[in-house]
Image (spheres, rainbow, N blue to C red):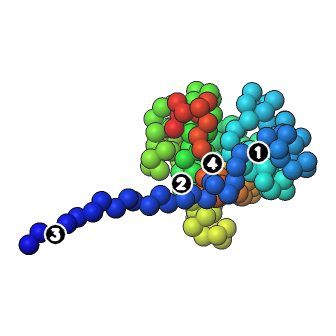
Amino acid sequence: MTLATTATAVPTVPTTGAYFPELTPETAPPTARRQLDQVARHLGYLPAAVGRLAHSPQLLDGFLKLSAMFDSTDLDPLVRETLVLTIATRNGCHLCVAMHTGALTRLAAAPELIAALRAQQPLPDARLEAVRTFVHAVLDHTGAVPEPELAAFLAHGFTPANALEIVLGIGAYTLSTFANRLTDAPIDPQLAPHA
């Protein structure tokens, strides 16, 4: 007695990205068109993720405003990018990992630092490790960071205002990483070398 086997096709699992086609300044809701134009002019191209976020002009506008506010804080660019890559890896946003690996590369960050951030490992720079650790403490304790952990962050030359600026960055980049994951935003060719 032999059993006949039939090949069964593995069903394709649809992704959430199918619900969020990339919009352009011509196809986006009117209230998102100005932001799409500005991003394209600033970067020299329109990232697919931004085109997908434009389905909600309010979310796109909110993220752009929050990230601009975060960029205007007293935190230096290396600290800000350390925070962003910490959030991106923690939240599993492959697009943000690639984008902010590129940003750190442009800042001439040490390859060892970038590799450690991407691997979610302790950083070779004590000050930046204090930032990474504090970001995790804020998230792990939903803001109610124990005093010793706040004191450890402040001991690296940061101020109480900087601690609140970290919270601002966490908010901005939690928003973007969650939205990018929901829309299943792909990595643009410009970011592929950093994927």
Of marks 4 and 3, the one in the foreground: 3
Q: Secondary structure at mark 2?
A: loop
Residue 191: image x %, image y %?
A: 59, 33
Q: Quadrant of the N terminus?
A: bottom left
Of marks 4 and 2, the one in the foreground: 4
Label 4 Cα crowd, 10 Å radius (few <14 / some 14-19 / many 20+): many
Of marks 1 and 2, the one in the foreground: 1
Q: Secondary structure at mark 3?
A: loop
Q: Residue under circle 2?
A: 92
Asked if the residue at tag 3 contacts the one at tag 4, i.e. Cβ–Cβ closer than 8 Å, the answer is no
Tag of residue 3: 3
Residue 17 in sight from this viewpoint: yes
**Cα separation between marks 3 and 1:** 51 Å
Q: Residue under circle 4?
A: 185
**Residue nearest the viewer, comparing 61 with 54:** 54
**Cα separation between marks 4 and 1:** 12 Å
Residue 148: image x %, image y %?
A: 58, 65
Q: Secondary structure at mark 1?
A: loop
Q: Quadrant of residue 77?
A: top right
